[in-house]
Amino acid sequence: MKRLLPLPNLWRSALVAAGVLAAVLPVAAQAQAWPGKQPIKLVAVFPPGGSVDQVARILAPVLQKSLGQSVVVDNKGGASGAIGTGAVAAAPADGYTFGVVFDTHGVNPALQPSLAYDTKRDLTTVSLIGTGAMVIATVASSPYKSFGDLVAAARGSTPVSYGSIGNGSLGHLALTLMARDGKLQLTHVPYRGGGPLMNDAVAGHVPVAVGSVFLAKPHIDSGRLRALAVTTSARSPQLPGVPTVAESGFAGFDAPAWWAVIAPAKTPPELVQRMNTELNKAMQTPDVAAKLAQQGISVHLGTPAQAQAFVDRQLEIWGKVVRENGITPD
């Protein structure tokens, strides 16, 4: 015989069920209505013209078409992406604000301890857009004909100078890690951006430069720079003839540039998943894939959990390099 609950217990159970339903219904309604309420803001955390801005502008019209809602790119540059990222962290977690970030997102917490946000607590990763190689290059007239020549010189009595786009940039950290692992004498010369770096590299004012494929390839193609190695574990599709650092005596070395889409941490998981799905669909279209490839980006498809795991690993790797080597911002 079925045992009946006492009447007060029935009331209590009903009230609990009603409370749960009341909490769930607004979220469900929000997910169902999204994105009909207002335009979606895609915050590019670097100024116009750079790769982050380009990625945002490649994705925006495709997302706008698939979602049936305006998608507006909002550039908020400064502090290696920290200004725009902070704006995303502080935005309402309603699915109408997302950010496009660069690999500095994985470095800034260690490099800038006074950030206005907590990267792990205040933000969530929606999608990893892709990764790209950085190129270690030298002027065409350089005595370094190969990566091996550079390594041999850096193991000599005189340090070899190299330029990057700035203190704490991924290029700086990657070569710091390479120098430590290979017992190389390398002296960092920070530049304020890719333009000044490339100007000095092609003029031979800095013996070696490290920068993205997008930044260096035009000068490599013109014959003014010689590519010595790429920093990813696999060769770059844009520079298939250039060996990796890993295959050149530094087994396991992998330091990719990367781009991702983030959102405020409390954004409903249903909306994060929906945006992830739309981004994956967008990146599989030939037009988007081709435009990203022109930026030196190899597309990565995957779930929000996979993207978050990648970002968490980058935070761990480069945070350790920053701390162990006492690296500070410009």
Image (cartoon, grey):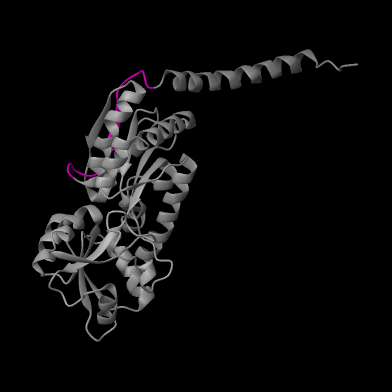
Q: Nearer the viewer, residue 88 or 49?
A: 49
x 26%, y 36%: residue: 58
Residue 66 to residue 152: above or below: above
In this view of the protein, can residue 114 be seen by the observer? no
Q: Name which quarter of the figure residue 328 lies in.
A: bottom left
Q: Name which quarter of the figure residue 148 lies in.
A: bottom left
Q: Nearer the viewer, residue 244 or 11?
A: 244
- Residue 2 falls left or right of residue 270: right
Q: Nearer the viewer, residue 174 or 266?
A: 174
| Secondary structure, magenta segment, majority class | loop
What stretch of residues is rendered in magenta?
Answer: 35-49
Q: Nearer the viewer, residue 83 or 270?
A: 270
Q: Position of residue 27 (x, y in %)?
A: 49, 23
Q: Residue furthest right?
A: 1
Residue 278 to residue 253: above or below: above
Q: Position of residue 326 (x, y in %)?
A: 32, 68
x 29%, y 82%: residue: 155
In this view of the protein, can residue 121 be seen by the observer? yes
- Residue 84 falls left or right of residue 275: left
Q: Position of residue 280 (x, y in %)?
A: 40, 36
Q: Position of residue 33 (x, y in %)?
A: 42, 18
Residue 42 covered by magenta stretch: yes
x 48%, y 32%: residue: 269
Residue 62 to residue 105: above or below: above
